[in-house]
Image: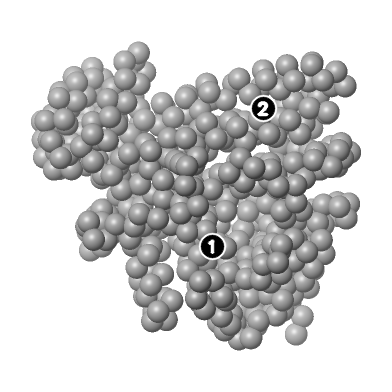
Amino acid sequence: MTVHFPFQNTYAALPASFFARVAPTPVASPRLIKLNRPLAKHLGLDPDWLESPEGAEILAGKRVPDGAEPIAMAYAGHQFGHFVPQLGDGRAILLGEVIDADGVRRDIQLKGSGPTPFSRRGDGRAALGPVLREYIVSEAMAALGIPTTRSLAAVMTGESVLRETPLPGAVLTRVASSHIRVGTFQYFAARGDTEGVRRLADHVIGRHYPQLANVDRPYHALLEAVIGRQAELVARWLLVGFIHGVMNTDNTSISGETIDYGPCAFMDHYDPATVFSSIDEQGRYAYANQPRIALWNLTRLAECLLPLFSDDQEKAISEAQSALSDFAERFSSAYQAGLRSKLGLFTVRDGDPALAQDLLDAMAKNQADFTLTFRRLSDAALDPADGRGVRQLFADPTGYDEWAARWRQRIGDEPQDPAARRAAMRAVNPAFIPRNHRVEAVIEAAVNRDDFALFEELLAVLSKPYEDQPALSGYGDPPEPHQRVLQTFCGT
C-alpha cells in the first residue's frame, strides 16, 4: 500500500550541492511509543493511520511515503569554537515539507534513521534515551511558548545501538519551520561558493522572511531579521532557566527556533555559571554565556553574507558590524521586558533592571530554585506581606526579605489590583519545567523496564506548565540532593 503525504518540497529542488539524496535505512520491527496527535492533525496528517503498524513503519523509516524526497542536508559549523567544513545530517533524513493549518511550511525529518554520506563513520542511529529527552523538552518548550522544533512521534526500532553499552534504538520524527542553520551558510562560504550562499539566502528569504524580498537591501535585512529572532529567542531561554548545552553554529537555526536538544537542561537553583553538558568542559555554553555565544554565532553568519553586501570588503564589514551592534539592545530589550513581567511590573522605571538583578543575585547567593522563586513570587503578589513560600527557598531568608521590601514598594506605585498582578505573573512564571531528575527517571524506566507510564505522565504535566495541577504538584519540586543530575550527555 502506497501512502501519500501532502508534501510540497522546495529544499530538494535546490542544486545537488545542498544535500545528498538518501533513503532511510529500514529497521527490524518498528513499535510506536508516542504520536503527537494534535500536531499530526495540524500538519494535515491522519493520526489514526499514523498509529497503525503501517504508520509506525513510515515514522521509523522502514517505509517511505509517496511524495517524499528523502535528503540529508549539507552544512558545516563551528563546534565549541573550532570550524569543521563539512558536517551535515549524519543521522537525520528530511522526508519533505508540508503546509500546516496556519499556512506555514514545515519540514518532516526522521532523526536516527540510518547512515548518510555525512555520518563520518557513525551508525546514523539514535538511542531511546536521547529520543525521549528531545521529545519531552521540545514539547515542553512549545507549551512554554518558546519557538522550537516539535516532536511528532517516537518509535522504537526493535534493534540495539552500541554506545558505551548496547541500548534500545529509536527514531524521532521532528518537525521544524526548516532545518537551515548558520552552519548551512558556512558550508558554502567555506568553499568560496558565493552563488551557493546567494541561492541559500534567497531561499531563506522566500521561506522565512518573505516581507524582505522587495526591500532595497534584502541580504542586509536578512541578517538584521535573524539577529532579532536569535536575540529574542535566547532572552526567552534565560527567562525560563534553559541551557541549550551545545550552541554550535550548526545548532543555530536561521528561523529562530530552538533546535537540536542534545545535552540541554533546565536550572534548578539559580547559578549563572551553570553547565550540565558533559562535553562543555570549559563552560563555553554556560547559562549566562548564551547571549554572548549567540552574538558570536551571528557574527559567523555575517561573515558568510559579506560578499552579498558589497564588492568593497571594508564597506561590507562596516555594514555587517552595524547590524551586529544591534544585538545587545535587542537582547536586553527582550530580556528586561521579560523580567519585568516575571516581577509583575506593568510600567517601566529606571530602577527596574537593578531590582531584577538584585533578586537574581540574592537567589544565587542563597541557592534558591529559579522556577519556584518566580512562581511563588506570583502568589506573593496577591498579598505582598506574605512571602513565606518564597522565603523558604532561600538559605538565608533575610536575603529575600531585604529585596521584597523594595519590590512591595515598587508594585505599590502601580494601580493594578493584586489579583490582576498575580494572574499576569502566573501566565509567565511556569509551575512546571522538565526537571532533569524527572527526565532521567523517564529514561531509566523506558530503557531498563520498557515502562513508558512516567513518560506519558510527564508529558501531560508539561503540556500545561502554567497551571497548578494539584494532583501532580510533585513534578514542580526541585530534586532532593541525592536526585540531582549534574551532567547531561549528547545523543551521539
Task: Examine the rendered structure and indicate whether residue 72 appears above or below residue 354.
Answer: below
Can residue 107 be seen from the camera position used here? yes
Give the class, few, some or many, for how many residues have Cα within 10 Å of label 1's Cα (few <14, many ≥20).
some
Please tell me in which quadrant of the rendered image residue 98 appears: bottom right
Farthest residue in the top direction?
350
Q: CA distance from mark 2 to mark 1?
A: 32 Å
Q: Three-letter amino acid code at disc 2?
A: Glu
**Residue that mark 1 sits on:** 491
Image location of residue 325, percent across then percent down: 60, 20
**Count of marks placed on residues:** 2
Image quarter in which the C terminus is found: bottom right
Label number found at residue 225: none
Q: Three-letter amino acid code at disc 1?
A: Gly
Task: Examine the rendered structure and indicate whether residue 263 appears above or below residue 169.
Answer: above
Image location of residue 150, percent across then percent down: 55, 57
SS of the residue under disc 2: helix
Residue at 55%, 35% in the rendered image: 293
Can residue 214 be seen from the camera position used here? no
Residue at 52%, 31% in the rendered image: 292
The one nearer the camera, 116 or 415, is: 116
Image location of residue 182, percent across then percent down: 68, 41
Image quarter in which the N terminus is found: bottom right
**Residue that mark 2 sits on:** 224
The one nearer the camera, 322 or 149, is: 322
Answer with mark 2 or mark 1, whichever residue precedes in sequence. Answer: 2
The one nearer the camera, 282 or 141, is: 282
Residue at 58%, 44% in the rendered image: 80
SS of the residue under disc 1: loop
Task: Examine the rendered structure and indicate whether residue 197 appears above or below residue 215.
Answer: below
Task: Examine the rendered structure and indicate whether residue 171 appears above or below residue 399.
Answer: below
